[in-house]
Amino acid sequence: MIGMNLHTLTAVISAIAVSGIDLEYRNEFKILPGHKVFNDFKLALPHTYIKEGELPDAFNWGNVDGK
């Protein structure tokens, strides 16, 4: 039984190698035509407009707004 599974696996790997299927990882990030500006962030960073004293002592996403 194990020999048969190993034989099947070997056959599948060989078929993929012979068929020329591209197994390379493809990135989902796509640059669309006409888009030339990649990082156009003009907003201030939080540390520039929030004082440390205004931040809560502790924070938990499980208890947002006291719910």
Image (spheres, rainbow, N blue to C red):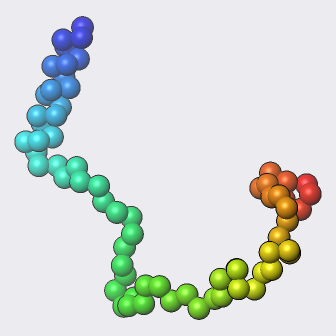
Q: Is residue 23 left or right of residue 65?
A: left
Residue 41 percent across, percent down from the top left: 55, 87
Q: Is residue 40 left or right of residue 61?
A: left
Which image quarter: residue 33?
bottom left
| Residue at position x 11%, y 41% in the image | 17
| Residue at position x 83%, y 58% in the image | 58
Residue 19 percent across, percent down from the top left: 10, 45
User: Up-down: is 67 above or below 44?
Assistant: above
Quadrant location, the C terminus: bottom right
Which image quarter: residue 15?
top left
Which image quarter: residue 31?
bottom left
| Residue at position x 11%, y 34% in the image | 14
Residue 61 percent across, percent down from the top left: 77, 55
User: Up-down: is 2 above or below 17?
Assistant: above
- Closer to the camera in the image, 13 or 52: 52
Q: Is residue 11 left or right of residue 54?
A: left
User: Up-down: is 18 above or below 50?
Assistant: above
| Residue at position x 83%, y 70% in the image | 55
Most distant residue in the front direction: 53
Most distant residue in the left direction: 18
- Closer to the camera in the image, 51 or 34: 51
